[in-house]
Image (cartoon, helix red, strand yellow):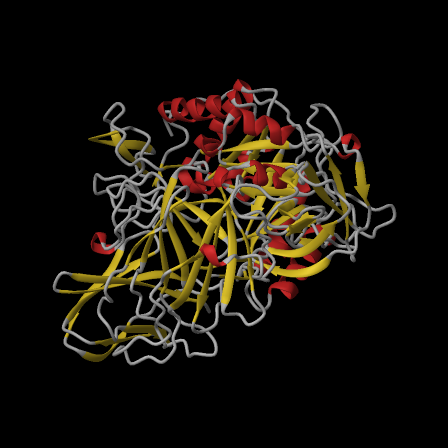
Amino acid sequence: MTGLIVFMMLSAGPIPGIDSTSDYLVYYGSWNDELIFRAQDFDLVVLEPSNITAEQLQTIRKGHDGIEGTDDDVIVLAYVSIGEVSDGNISGNGLGPCYYDPDSDAIIYENQGYASFYLDDADHNGVPDRNGTWGSYYVYAGDTTWWDFVEAEADAALAKGADGLFLDTVDTASPWGNYGWTAQGMSALISHLRDRYPDIYLMPNRGLFYFDPHQTAYAWNIRPFINAVLFECYYTEWDWNNDRGVVSPYFDDNRDYWAYYVNAQANQDDGFTVFALDYLNPEQSDYDSLLQNQIQVTIVDQAWVDYVATVMLDGIYYGVFHNHPDGDRNPPTWDNSVGVGTATAESTSVILRWGPVSDQTEPVHFNVYYSTNSFNDPSDATDSLLNVPAVSDTYGIYVWRYTVNNLQPNTTYYFMVRVEDSATPPHEDQNRVVVSVTTGSGGQSGGITIDGVFDDWLPGYQLDTNDHPEEAGDGLAADGDFVDLWSTYDTVNLYYSYLVAGSIDFNSYFYHIFLDTDRNTSTGYRGEGNDFSIGADYMVENGTLWHYTGSGGSDWSWESAGSINYAIGDNNSRIELAIPFSSLNTTPGSVVWSIFNINQATSPYSQSDIAPNDYTNYHYPISSAVVEENRTHILKGFKIMYSDGQLMVNLADRSELKLYDAAGRMLGKWRFAAGSHRLNIGLPSGIYIATVSSGNRTVSRKIAIFR
């Protein structure tokens, strides 16, 4: 074949310090401080370089101690695709796409205005061939025009400080597809990358055919150029239809055939480290058994490095990390939030709350470090409480609580919570999360304590809500409507409390507080048809404060702005919560407008008992009198629920129904007469928004589907 440049072969060798006892991570999502801390738990990380800054990448590399060159350093490899490209419209030299003609042993360029590296072997239709699963376009890796694109991505990733490159889509050159003729060119590109970057690590994804002496591609063996190979889907692969991992139908061949040849090459003097990457959904019923099998067939049987995740690789999982067959060698890990989450002050005590943790050697123990001066290392704290008797809690995402007593009033304290396991010796995690809080009261609140006891809410905090435990004419008895509402503030927090006629399940998706901090009704979330009288910049849902990132109107787009402090009373009908002004990007003395919304009643009422959803609006000025604005009920009698593939709707008027997914994409639109209706529509687990319009009236409801 023509058009191929072959470069000198350079020896690479395995990655030093990495073996089957190592922990590695593949994560392609975006980054924040908490995720960076999680990544520092691992010995090697494969990441998408476009989603991380140079500073963040360097923080991961230095490990928990923040010092480069120590034992806890993390090797970082940056993702680069070398067999496919996401952009299908690169014009380049205009010679492409191309295909291989076996009769003439030549590459045929179709001159259709595409870059010469695009492939068209599937149908010779003059258009680049496309990956049907991911939507990317296949390329001829031996085309040196393509090398320029690969080098540009590699240069950008390495400029951020990556230790090497993870070379994906090598299997484009597989002999079992349309492009086996590109295997020599793929090998030449990997050889070229070794030549251009002699001091970095190179890890291709699969490309196993290069290691089989029975394959033609063995003549262009890539072993001399690489430091590692990732064997993707060795034991399990992803079942897209059922959103879960399943045992690969090729596992027997992988174990009995391919593992033999991979190991034979890996164990050469110039061999490489072998990594396994397999897919499981932690929610699937057979997760534990498949995970244990995975560890057995990869770490124990093959002595490979292993990681298990969901197929989108947008989460960090510790399944293998916490099930190592050689015993516990890691500190505990935080399941959903790192370190101490909230601190609630009283006059001489502080209530600390934090989330769940996992470890191979339980029970775990919690250590509290605190000081009146800011610190980021426990050794700098003036006081410590080791192995504290924390108690279980049901406070949003937090499940542990401990109260530090005998503190000074009206004093600012800083707190850190670390967790250690029961191994010998114990391992303590290295998080540096510190929360600060001032004891005593401040502002106008008189000292509200978020504890589910409401005797500290003075009558002056209560707002006139036109009490209505039963809405006349709506056909629903004592549903989830507001009965009373309270609000106040101090120098730190904005406080709300409300009472409903039914029961509060604050962890459902049906209780919201929308907040307009800039008092601009033309910006922020305004609901379907702009049916809010405010433009919400923030929203409280499920114990989390969300910041609006959408374009306005009904565009449902939010990012987390942190957790809030809340507690529900013993009778489950009243809640109190505190929202830090710092999280709202505003200060006491400004004005915040609020909308309170309950759009589904909960136990003891049935899930079909939908509250009238009146979007009662309370414009709450923090520093002056409360202005109340009541809106009449919209579409009384409207009910909607989803069960067993059917969307069931009850309408009081002739109406139009629209259904949206959580990203704001409309899934369907229907028109109905008054009455009850059923739609057969299969919906996967997730959050959906249904809007119903009648005349100039519109109402929105959220539907949560869990399987």
The residue sitting at the left extreme is: 695
Closer to the camera, 86 or 328? Answer: 328
> Residue 411: percent from the left, percent from the top?
68, 36
- As rendered, which of 30 and 290 lies closer to the eye? 30
Q: Nearer the viewer, residue 665 or 455?
A: 455
Viewer-side residue, 23 vs 51: 51
Reply above or below: 363 against 261: below
* Left or right position of 245 against 517: right
Residue 605: percent from left, percent from top: 43, 78
Give the quadrant of residue 394. bottom right
Q: Is residue 363 left or right of residue 707?
A: right
The percent position of residue 102, horizontal first and vertical second, equals 33, 39
Asked if residue 546 can be seen in this view, the reply is yes
Work out which residue is located at the far right of the displayed protein and give it: 424
Q: Is residue 207 visible?
A: no
Looking at the image, which residue is at 57% across and 34% down? 203
Give the total number of marks visible in the rendering: 0
Quarter location, residue 46: top right
**Horizontal relation, residue 609 to residue 275: left or right:** left
In the rendered view, does 348 fall on the left or right side of 697? right
Quadrant placement of the N terminus: top left
